[in-house]
Image: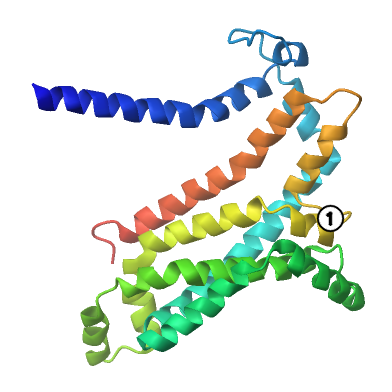
Amino acid sequence: MGRLISRILSRGLLALFVLVALAPILWTVLSSFKKLRDIVTPVPKLFFSPTLENFATILLNPSIRDGLYNSVVVVGVSVFLGALLGIPAAFGLARLPERLKGEMQFFVLSLRFMPPVAIAIPFIVIYLDLGIYDTLFGLILVYLVTTVSTVIWLSVPAFERVPREIEEAAAMEGCTPAEIFLKFSLPIAAPSLFGALVFTFVLVWNELLLALTLAAENGTLPVVAASITSLGKEVPWGVINAATVILVLPPLVFIGLLMGFINRMVAPGRK
Protein backbone atom coordinates (compact mmCIF):
# COMPACT_ATOMS: atom_id res chain seq x y z
CA MET A 1 0.00 0.00 0.00
CA GLY A 2 2.81 2.40 0.90
CA ARG A 3 4.56 1.63 -2.37
CA LEU A 4 1.36 2.40 -4.32
CA ILE A 5 0.93 5.75 -2.55
CA SER A 6 4.58 6.60 -3.19
CA ARG A 7 4.18 5.76 -6.88
CA ILE A 8 1.03 7.90 -7.16
CA LEU A 9 2.70 10.84 -5.44
CA SER A 10 5.83 10.59 -7.60
CA ARG A 11 3.78 10.47 -10.79
CA GLY A 12 1.61 13.34 -9.62
CA LEU A 13 4.69 15.40 -8.84
CA LEU A 14 6.17 14.56 -12.23
CA ALA A 15 2.92 15.58 -13.94
CA LEU A 16 2.98 18.87 -12.01
CA PHE A 17 6.55 19.58 -13.14
CA VAL A 18 5.63 18.80 -16.76
CA LEU A 19 2.60 21.10 -16.53
CA VAL A 20 4.70 23.93 -15.10
CA ALA A 21 7.29 23.46 -17.84
CA LEU A 22 4.71 23.36 -20.64
CA ALA A 23 2.48 26.16 -19.33
CA PRO A 24 4.45 29.03 -20.96
CA ILE A 25 4.53 27.18 -24.27
CA LEU A 26 0.81 26.45 -24.20
CA TRP A 27 0.05 30.04 -23.21
CA THR A 28 2.15 31.33 -26.10
CA VAL A 29 0.27 29.11 -28.54
CA LEU A 30 -3.08 30.26 -27.15
CA SER A 31 -2.04 33.92 -27.30
CA SER A 32 -1.02 33.55 -30.94
CA PHE A 33 -4.70 32.96 -31.76
CA LYS A 34 -5.99 35.84 -29.64
CA LYS A 35 -6.78 39.39 -30.60
CA LEU A 36 -4.82 42.10 -28.83
CA ARG A 37 -7.74 43.08 -26.59
CA ASP A 38 -8.01 39.47 -25.35
CA ILE A 39 -4.29 39.40 -24.51
CA VAL A 40 -3.99 42.69 -22.61
CA THR A 41 -7.17 42.17 -20.58
CA PRO A 42 -6.51 42.27 -16.79
CA VAL A 43 -8.24 38.90 -16.33
CA PRO A 44 -6.61 36.18 -18.49
CA LYS A 45 -9.05 34.64 -20.96
CA LEU A 46 -9.07 30.91 -21.52
CA PHE A 47 -12.18 31.06 -23.71
CA PHE A 48 -12.08 33.45 -26.65
CA SER A 49 -12.88 33.73 -30.33
CA PRO A 50 -9.75 32.50 -32.13
CA THR A 51 -8.32 34.44 -35.04
CA LEU A 52 -5.66 33.82 -37.66
CA GLU A 53 -4.88 37.51 -38.14
CA ASN A 54 -1.60 37.24 -36.24
CA PHE A 55 -0.33 34.42 -38.44
CA ALA A 56 -1.56 36.22 -41.55
CA THR A 57 0.40 39.32 -40.49
CA ILE A 58 3.52 37.20 -40.11
CA LEU A 59 3.20 35.05 -43.22
CA LEU A 60 2.19 37.94 -45.48
CA ASN A 61 5.16 40.01 -44.32
CA PRO A 62 7.92 39.75 -46.97
CA SER A 63 10.66 40.33 -44.41
CA ILE A 64 9.41 37.38 -42.31
CA ARG A 65 9.37 35.09 -45.34
CA ASP A 66 12.85 36.20 -46.33
CA GLY A 67 14.07 35.70 -42.76
CA LEU A 68 12.60 32.20 -42.66
CA TYR A 69 14.24 31.34 -45.98
CA ASN A 70 17.59 32.72 -44.82
CA SER A 71 17.41 30.78 -41.55
CA VAL A 72 16.55 27.51 -43.27
CA VAL A 73 19.41 27.90 -45.77
CA VAL A 74 22.06 29.17 -43.35
CA VAL A 75 21.27 26.82 -40.47
CA GLY A 76 20.61 23.80 -42.68
CA VAL A 77 23.87 24.16 -44.62
CA SER A 78 25.96 24.99 -41.54
CA VAL A 79 24.61 22.02 -39.56
CA PHE A 80 25.07 19.69 -42.55
CA LEU A 81 28.67 20.84 -43.06
CA GLY A 82 29.26 20.75 -39.30
CA ALA A 83 28.10 17.14 -39.19
CA LEU A 84 30.05 16.26 -42.35
CA LEU A 85 33.26 17.63 -40.85
CA GLY A 86 32.67 17.15 -37.14
CA ILE A 87 31.46 13.55 -36.94
CA PRO A 88 34.49 12.00 -38.72
CA ALA A 89 36.75 14.29 -36.68
CA ALA A 90 35.08 13.11 -33.47
CA PHE A 91 35.60 9.49 -34.55
CA GLY A 92 39.30 10.18 -35.06
CA LEU A 93 39.59 11.98 -31.71
CA ALA A 94 37.89 9.11 -29.89
CA ARG A 95 40.62 6.74 -31.10
CA LEU A 96 43.57 8.94 -30.07
CA PRO A 97 45.63 8.28 -26.91
CA GLU A 98 43.95 9.64 -23.81
CA ARG A 99 46.30 12.57 -23.18
CA LEU A 100 46.32 13.81 -26.77
CA LYS A 101 42.57 13.34 -27.00
CA GLY A 102 42.00 15.43 -23.89
CA GLU A 103 44.13 18.28 -25.25
CA MET A 104 42.31 18.27 -28.57
CA GLN A 105 38.92 18.17 -26.88
CA PHE A 106 39.88 21.13 -24.71
CA PHE A 107 40.94 23.07 -27.82
CA VAL A 108 37.60 22.31 -29.49
CA LEU A 109 35.71 23.32 -26.35
CA SER A 110 37.74 26.54 -26.08
CA LEU A 111 36.15 27.66 -29.34
CA ARG A 112 32.87 27.81 -27.43
CA PHE A 113 34.39 29.84 -24.57
CA MET A 114 34.55 32.98 -26.68
CA PRO A 115 31.52 35.26 -26.43
CA PRO A 116 29.77 35.90 -29.78
CA VAL A 117 30.75 39.57 -29.75
CA ALA A 118 34.44 38.55 -29.65
CA ILE A 119 33.88 36.67 -32.92
CA ALA A 120 31.53 39.16 -34.55
CA ILE A 121 33.76 42.25 -34.43
CA PRO A 122 36.80 40.67 -36.21
CA PHE A 123 34.50 38.98 -38.72
CA ILE A 124 32.92 42.34 -39.62
CA VAL A 125 36.32 43.71 -40.63
CA ILE A 126 37.30 40.53 -42.49
CA TYR A 127 33.97 40.26 -44.31
CA LEU A 128 34.05 43.91 -45.39
CA ASP A 129 37.53 43.40 -46.86
CA LEU A 130 36.47 40.18 -48.63
CA GLY A 131 33.16 41.61 -49.84
CA ILE A 132 31.02 38.92 -48.20
CA TYR A 133 29.44 41.07 -45.48
CA ASP A 134 25.65 40.70 -45.36
CA THR A 135 25.66 37.47 -47.38
CA LEU A 136 24.33 34.01 -46.57
CA PHE A 137 27.74 32.57 -47.38
CA GLY A 138 29.33 34.76 -44.72
CA LEU A 139 26.79 33.68 -42.10
CA ILE A 140 27.35 30.02 -42.96
CA LEU A 141 31.11 30.43 -42.48
CA VAL A 142 30.80 32.02 -39.05
CA TYR A 143 28.14 29.51 -37.97
CA LEU A 144 30.56 26.69 -38.84
CA VAL A 145 32.69 27.77 -35.88
CA THR A 146 29.75 26.84 -33.66
CA THR A 147 28.47 23.76 -35.48
CA VAL A 148 31.82 22.00 -36.00
CA SER A 149 33.05 22.57 -32.45
CA THR A 150 29.72 21.58 -30.88
CA VAL A 151 29.32 18.44 -33.01
CA ILE A 152 32.88 17.31 -32.26
CA TRP A 153 32.57 17.90 -28.53
CA LEU A 154 29.25 16.07 -28.22
CA SER A 155 30.10 13.23 -30.63
CA VAL A 156 33.38 12.05 -29.09
CA PRO A 157 31.64 10.29 -26.13
CA ALA A 158 29.29 8.55 -28.58
CA PHE A 159 32.21 6.95 -30.44
CA GLU A 160 34.01 6.15 -27.19
CA ARG A 161 31.09 3.87 -26.28
CA VAL A 162 31.46 1.85 -29.49
CA PRO A 163 33.13 -1.46 -28.51
CA ARG A 164 36.68 -1.65 -29.81
CA GLU A 165 36.24 -5.39 -30.36
CA ILE A 166 33.78 -4.74 -33.19
CA GLU A 167 36.20 -2.45 -34.99
CA GLU A 168 39.12 -4.85 -34.45
CA ALA A 169 37.07 -7.75 -35.82
CA ALA A 170 36.10 -5.69 -38.87
CA ALA A 171 39.75 -4.75 -39.43
CA MET A 172 40.75 -8.43 -39.27
CA GLU A 173 38.16 -9.13 -41.98
CA GLY A 174 39.95 -6.68 -44.25
CA CYS A 175 37.73 -3.60 -43.81
CA THR A 176 39.36 -0.24 -44.40
CA PRO A 177 39.12 2.49 -41.73
CA ALA A 178 36.45 4.25 -43.84
CA GLU A 179 34.39 1.05 -44.04
CA ILE A 180 34.75 0.47 -40.29
CA PHE A 181 33.51 4.00 -39.66
CA LEU A 182 30.57 3.88 -42.09
CA LYS A 183 29.40 0.30 -41.61
CA PHE A 184 30.00 -0.30 -37.91
CA SER A 185 30.92 2.68 -35.74
CA LEU A 186 28.52 5.21 -37.24
CA PRO A 187 25.36 3.04 -37.03
CA ILE A 188 26.15 2.08 -33.42
CA ALA A 189 26.79 5.70 -32.37
CA ALA A 190 23.89 7.10 -34.41
CA PRO A 191 21.33 7.39 -31.55
CA SER A 192 23.76 9.48 -29.50
CA LEU A 193 24.77 11.55 -32.52
CA PHE A 194 21.10 12.41 -32.97
CA GLY A 195 21.16 14.39 -29.73
CA ALA A 196 24.32 16.22 -30.79
CA LEU A 197 22.81 17.29 -34.11
CA VAL A 198 19.54 18.40 -32.51
CA PHE A 199 21.35 20.48 -29.89
CA THR A 200 23.58 22.03 -32.56
CA PHE A 201 20.60 22.83 -34.80
CA VAL A 202 18.64 24.51 -32.01
CA LEU A 203 21.77 26.41 -30.89
CA VAL A 204 22.41 28.03 -34.27
CA TRP A 205 18.71 28.39 -35.17
CA ASN A 206 18.18 30.67 -32.17
CA GLU A 207 21.47 32.57 -32.63
CA LEU A 208 20.82 36.33 -32.72
CA LEU A 209 23.95 38.41 -32.12
CA LEU A 210 26.10 37.08 -34.97
CA ALA A 211 23.25 37.34 -37.48
CA LEU A 212 22.41 40.83 -36.20
CA THR A 213 25.96 42.14 -36.61
CA LEU A 214 27.01 40.31 -39.79
CA ALA A 215 23.85 40.79 -41.85
CA ALA A 216 21.73 43.82 -42.64
CA GLU A 217 19.40 42.95 -45.52
CA ASN A 218 19.85 39.17 -45.24
CA GLY A 219 18.91 38.75 -41.60
CA THR A 220 17.75 35.41 -40.22
CA LEU A 221 14.35 34.76 -38.68
CA PRO A 222 15.35 35.57 -35.05
CA VAL A 223 16.62 38.98 -36.21
CA VAL A 224 13.45 39.72 -38.17
CA ALA A 225 11.21 38.42 -35.37
CA ALA A 226 12.96 40.68 -32.87
CA SER A 227 12.35 43.69 -35.10
CA ILE A 228 8.56 43.32 -35.17
CA THR A 229 8.28 44.49 -31.56
CA SER A 230 8.51 48.04 -32.90
CA LEU A 231 5.48 47.79 -35.20
CA GLY A 232 3.15 50.69 -34.47
CA LYS A 233 2.67 52.44 -31.14
CA GLU A 234 1.40 49.36 -29.31
CA VAL A 235 3.35 46.20 -28.70
CA PRO A 236 1.77 43.59 -31.04
CA TRP A 237 1.68 40.74 -28.53
CA GLY A 238 -0.41 38.50 -30.76
CA VAL A 239 1.97 38.94 -33.68
CA ILE A 240 4.97 38.33 -31.40
CA ASN A 241 3.42 35.09 -30.09
CA ALA A 242 2.63 33.97 -33.64
CA ALA A 243 6.23 34.71 -34.66
CA THR A 244 7.43 32.66 -31.69
CA VAL A 245 5.31 29.69 -32.77
CA ILE A 246 6.63 29.91 -36.33
CA LEU A 247 10.18 30.23 -34.99
CA VAL A 248 9.78 27.02 -32.99
CA LEU A 249 8.19 24.90 -35.74
CA PRO A 250 11.29 24.28 -37.95
CA PRO A 251 13.36 22.77 -35.09
CA LEU A 252 10.43 20.50 -34.25
CA VAL A 253 10.14 19.40 -37.89
CA PHE A 254 13.91 18.82 -38.01
CA ILE A 255 13.77 16.73 -34.84
CA GLY A 256 10.89 14.64 -36.25
CA LEU A 257 12.67 13.99 -39.54
CA LEU A 258 15.94 13.15 -37.82
CA MET A 259 14.20 10.79 -35.39
CA GLY A 260 12.59 8.96 -38.30
CA PHE A 261 15.98 8.64 -40.01
CA ILE A 262 17.66 7.35 -36.85
CA ASN A 263 14.84 4.87 -36.20
CA ARG A 264 15.18 3.46 -39.71
CA MET A 265 18.96 3.23 -39.29
CA VAL A 266 18.83 1.28 -36.05
CA ALA A 267 15.66 -0.70 -36.79
CA PRO A 268 15.95 -4.49 -36.33
CA GLY A 269 16.59 -6.35 -39.52
CA ARG A 270 18.32 -3.45 -41.28
CA LYS A 271 21.10 -4.69 -43.52
Q: In the image, what residue occupies the spot 50% across and 72% down?
A: 152
| Along the viewing direction, whichever of 55 and 128 lies nearer the viewer | 128
| Along the viewing direction, whichever of 18 and 133 lies nearer the viewer | 18
Q: Quadrant of the N terminus?
A: top left
Query: Element at badge 1?
Result: loop
Q: What amino acid is labelled 1 in the image?
A: Asn
Q: In the image, what residue occupies the spot 73% across and 46% down?
A: 222
The reply to whether residue 202 is visible in this rendering is yes
Colouring mode (rainbow / by chain / secondary structure / one colour):
rainbow
Residue 166 location, quadrant: bottom left
Graded by Cα atoms within 10 Å as few (under 14), some (14 to 19) or many (20 or more), the crowding at tag 1 reads: many
Relative image position of residue 79 (x, y in whole percent): 59, 63
Position of 116 relative to 253 (above/below): below
Q: Is residue 66 left or right of residue 39?
A: right
Relative image position of residue 136 (x, y in whole percent): 78, 63
Q: Is residue 54 left or right of residue 266?
A: right
Residue 156 location, quadrant: bottom left
